[in-house]
Amino acid sequence: MISLPELCTKALRQYVPVLRAHLAGENPFPLPLRASKALDRTQGSAHIYEQQAELLAHSKNRTGSGYWLTTSPNRKTGQSEVSRIEFETLADFLSFIDKQAEFDLFVANTRRTTTELPELLPLLQQSPRLLLDHAANWAGLLTVCAYFRQHPQPNEYVRSLPLALPTKFVEQHQAPLRSLLDWLIPDYVRAEETDFFRRFHLLLEEPGIKLRFLDAAQRLHPAVSQVSLWVSEFRNLNLPVRRVYIIENLTSFLAFPLAEKAVAIWGGGFAVSLLAGADWLSGKQLFYWGDIDVHGFQILAQLRVHFPAAQSLLMDEGTFAQYHSGGTGGHFTPQTLAGLTSSEQQLYQTLLATNARLEQEKLPLRYVAIAVQQTITTAPH
């Protein structure tokens, strides 16, 4: 015979179907639940009674609410046995699973949706948990949806949307809003975009690229030695310089020596991927200087995917042997790097085996300046 905890579990499984029925205007009550287990008759009538006793004690037959038990006499023993379990009314069902308050809010939000955005009702009939799981914020979600129905391509920053809501509301509720807006304005959704903001035509602050002019004659303005540009602006910049030095760490970028007809870019680790699409860089002599560690060479290889002619700077065995004093790197994921030269590959394999690390800030500025000057004097003219 089914136990009381098992009955509760079965009833909870019927909750979403009951919600779906409510949205469809259907009444599934009386709602039967299968007992699913036969009585254990091997230990006699007294044991059968014990199996049923807990169910009887908590049934509507005894308490006035919850599930109703229908009993019928066993022909052989004459003893009454449970033959049917059902919830006669919605109130009985909700009382048993302790969902009355939650259901009342569900109903209120359904009515609000019917009034404000009835177009969403078919979606909610398919996915009632969407309404259930976000009940506390449903009014705000409807407010956002109503705005997008009127302005399906806002082309504004999300926190500038004229909504009577906290400015972070949309950002904090992207998951339900994506489902709702995909349904509500499908013709205006950028379906190929996984990013929420791009998908729904919201503006994003672009990543920035920090740039230093190493030659005063190349500055955009005499008083400006460094600038920060949006990626899209940088890609269209096309500065009339010969050399571009991409430097991983900020301190090394700021302390990098001056050089004629050159600029320095702060790479910021794996942010070098932001340079992809800046086609004007392909026409320059391009150098990358990073830490001598596994990550440094992985970044170099990533840069060469976009700019195969990029050269490494101060990432050689001689520099490593002279200045490495036992430093080690952090966690890394080993990768096979196809874009390295033979000498770079040999050093990379050593770093993979030892996790050694020489931070670029450890190099004396004079040593760096000599290496930079060599890139100038040995450059083709």
Image: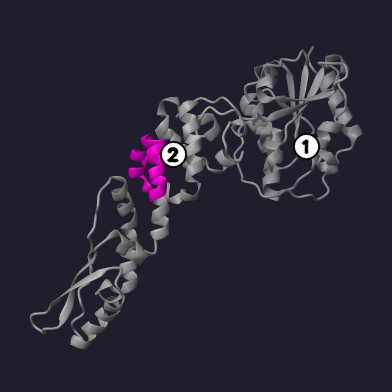
Name the residue at the left extreme: 75
Amino acid carrying mark 2 in the image: Ser
Hey, which quadrant is residue 316 in on the image? top right
Residue 116, numbered circle: none
The residue at the point 8 percent across, 80 percent down is 75
Q: Magenta includes 41?
A: no
Of 373 and 3, which appears nearest the observer? Answer: 3
Q: Earlier in the sequence, mark 1 or mark 2?
A: 2
- Residue 44 in the image: above or below residue 125: below
Quadrant location of the C terminus? Answer: top right
**Circle 2 residues within 10 Å: few <14, some 14–19, many ≥20:** few
Q: Look at discs 1 and 2 and give the one toward the viewer.
A: 2
Callout 1 amino acid? Asn
Task: Give the overall secondary structure of the magenta segment.
Answer: helix
Image position, residue 140 (x, y; %): 51, 41
Q: Residue at the spot x=71%, y=34% of the render?
A: 343
Extent of the magenta region = 107-128
Residue beneath disc 2 = 179
Label 1 – label 2 distance at C-alpha: 41 Å
Residue that numbered label 1 is attached to: 249
x and y percent of residue 50 in the render? 26, 84
Does residue 220 sit above or below 354 in this rendering?
above
Relative side of 171 to 255, left or right: left
Say which quadrant the N terminus sits in. Answer: bottom left
Q: Position of residue 366 (x, y in %)?
A: 91, 32
Determine whether the residue tagged by mark 1 lies in a helix, strand or loop: loop
Q: Name the element at disc 2.
A: helix
Identify which residue is drawn at 74% across, 47% down: 356
Q: Which quarter of the picture shows residue 7?
A: bottom left
Whether residue 113 is in magenta: the answer is yes
Residue 341 visible in the snapshot: no
